[in-house]
Amino acid sequence: MLLVSSISIFLALLFYFKYTNFIIEIVNNFTTQKIEFANIFLPLGISFYTFELISYVVDVFHKKIKPLKRFIDFSFYVSFFPHLVAGPIVRPHELIPQIFRKVNIDNTFIGSAVYYLCMGLFKKAVISDYISSNFVDRIFDNPTLYSGTENILGAYTYTLQIYCDFSGYSDMAIGIALLMGFHLPNNFNRPYQATSITDFWRRWHISLSLWLRDYLYISLGGNRKGRFRTYINLFLTMLLGGLWHGANFKFIFWGALHGLALVVEKLFQSIFRSKNIVQQNSASNFYRKIKLFLGSILTFHFVTFCWIFFRATTFESAFDMIYKITDGVDCKLLINILMGYEGVFTLVIIGYVLHFVPKNIDFATERILVKTPLIFQSILLSLFIWLVIQVKSAEVLPFIYFQF
C-alpha cells in the first residue's frame, strides 16, 4: 500500500505539471468543449528526480537498499545538483553509499573532471550550439523553404547536435560531480556506432534505458510470459519512454517507431536464431564484419529518420521535411551548401570524428591528463572556456533535454 501510494503521488505530480495541458488539448480536439489551458510552470528537472524517487522507494521495498535514516541524506540523493536537470538518472545504490564515504579529491578526480568538463563544453557550447543556431534551426523551422539536399543535411546535422548537446551535459555533470568527490555513471557510449536498435539503446541515454528496463519492462512481465507478451512489453516500454520525453504526439510516435523496430529485431532473431548458430560456426570473420557494418549503417539511418519527428515542431513539419528529402541530393547544390556553411560543416566533421574515435584513445587522453600538473589542467580548462566565449551564440541556448 505504501509503495503504490508513493509511486502514485510521484506520478500524479509529474502528470499535473507535464501533461495537464496535453490532456486539455486532446479533449478540445475530440469534443465540442473548449477548456482553457492551465498556466502551469514546469519545474526544472521534474522528470529526472521523479524517476529517482520511484527507483528509491521500489529498491527499498524489494530490500535492495536500506532506507536512509535522515531526511537530509534522502534530500541530498534526490537533489544532487550536477545531474539533476538532464541526467544521468542515478540509482540509489550508485550514489547513496558515496554520501557516507569520506571525500578524498585527489589528482585522479581532478584530472578526470577537467577531461569531462573540456569534452562537455566543446560538444555542447561549441559544436551543438553553433550548428544549431546557424543551420539546424533554420531547416527544421521552415523545411519547405529549403531544398531536399538542405533538408537531408539538416537531419544528419541534428543527429549530431542532439548527441553533442545531451552527452555534453552528461559529461559536464560527471566532471562537476568528480570535483565534489562523487562518481556518476557514464550516460553515453558512442551510440551511432550501434549495430542494431537494441545496441543503440544500450549506448544512448544508458541510465534511462536501464531504468525503463528494470522498473517498467520487467514490471510489465519482461520476457517471462511468452514471446508475444515480450513484444507487447517492449513496444509499450518504448511508447511510454516517448511520452516521458514530452507531452506531444510526435514524441509518442517517435517512441512507437523505436518500439516497433525493437519488436521486429526480436522477431527476426527468434526466427533465424538456430540458422545463425549453424552459420556462425562456419562463417568467416570477414562476413561477420560485413554484417555488423551493414547493421550499423541501417541503424544510424533509422535513428536519423526518427530524430526528424523528435525535432520537428509539428507532425506536418516532419512530413514536409521527409517529402522534401525524397527529392534526393543535388551534387552541385551540395557543394555550394558545404562551401556556404563552411564553419558549420567543419564542426560537423569534427563532431562525427570525435564520436567514431576508438574508445582506447579517449581512455589514453584521460590518463595523460590525469598525470599532468594541476597548473596545466587549469590552463587547459581556461582555454576551453575562452574558446566557448569566442564561438558562443548571441543568446544562450538551453540544453535540449531541459524541456523534459
Image: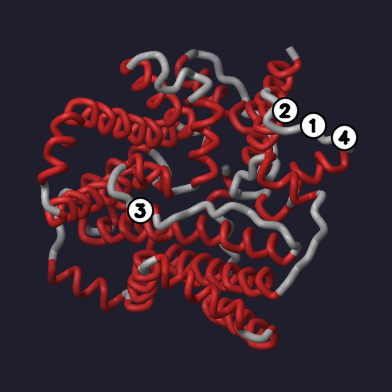
Kind of residue at disc 3: Asn
- Label 1 to label 3, Cα distance in Å? 52 Å
Report the front residue among 295 and 32. 295
Q: Residues within 10 Å of mark 1 (few under 14, many from 20)?
A: some
Kind of residue at disc 4: Lys
- What residue is shown with label 2? 60
Q: Is label 1 in contact with label 2 (beta carbons under 8 Å)?
A: yes
- Quarter holding the C terminus is top right
Kind of residue at disc 2: Val
- What residue is shown with label 4? 69
Rendered image: mark on residue 142 = 3
- What residue is shown with label 1? 67
- Quarter holding the N terminus is top right
Relative image position of residue 172 (x, y in whole percent): 61, 63
**Residue 399 occupies quadrant:** bottom right
**Residue 113 occupies quadrant:** bottom right
Instruction: Look at the image and tell me whether residue 54 can be seen.
Output: yes
Q: Describe the element under mark 3 as helix, strand or loop.
A: loop
